[in-house]
Image (spheres, rainbow, N blue to C red):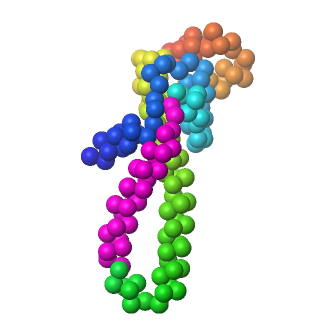
Amino acid sequence: MINNLKKKIISYIYVISNQPVKLQELLSANQSFNEGMHLDGKRLGFRLRLGRAYIVFLLLINIVMFPVALITHEVFQSADCHISIFITIFVTGIIFASFGLFKDWLSDEVAKKRIQMMWQLHFAYFEYEEYNKQVSDIYMLAISENIAKQDLERYILNKLSD
């Protein structure tokens, strides 16, 4: 259920291109993703719809915060107003800070999905989960050896088959 919800949210928030990603861009994106870097959507063919991201985020926050507000209403009604103001400021700060985390998390999920899709195109016989780190190491070796772009695929496939 959570995976279906995540897929629906991603398809609603992001525009994902049907065009393939070039091999070198895929290898570079895979390398960066394995290092924990956030990826640029232009390289992998996806774009965030910011307005829709705000709408989904606000809906998710309200789903979480509404029951909490109902539960804590009695406590804050009888508490000092200064405590209520302080907690409101704190919760508002957390909500605004968490939107950036939400956006980064979704971007990472889309980037991983897109890398896996393009992996099937370029390395159809090598499973992503099993070979992505090995291909990343081979790519770094190819860069250090100044392998030409047109020879890159053959170089990587030769190294994988060894």
Q: Eyeballing the image, is 15 above or below 107?
A: above
Q: What is the quadrant of residue 40 in the picture?
A: top right
Q: What is the quadrant of residue 124 in the picture?
A: top left
Is residue 52 at all visible to an observer of this figure?
yes
Q: Residue at x 46, y 29 (%)?
A: 16
Q: Eyeballing the image, is 40 above or below 96?
A: above
- Please state if 60 lies on the left or on the right of 135 as rendered: left
Per the rendered image, the range of residues in magenta is: 46-72
- In the rendered image, the residue lying farthest to the left is 1
Q: Eyeballing the image, is 148 above or below 83?
A: above
Q: How many marks?
A: 0
Q: Residue at x 30, y 41 (%)?
A: 4
Residue 104: image location, x then y, percent: 53, 46
Question: Is 56 within the magenta?
Answer: yes
Q: Residue at x 33, y 84 (%)?
A: 74
Magenta: main secondary structure equals helix
Residue 135: image location, x then y, percent: 55, 25
Is residue 108 at all visible to an observer of this figure?
no
Q: Residue at x 53, y 72 (%)?
A: 90
Residue 103: image location, x then y, percent: 51, 47
Residue 84: image location, x then y, percent: 47, 82
- Please state if 59 lies on the left or on the right of 41 as rendered: left
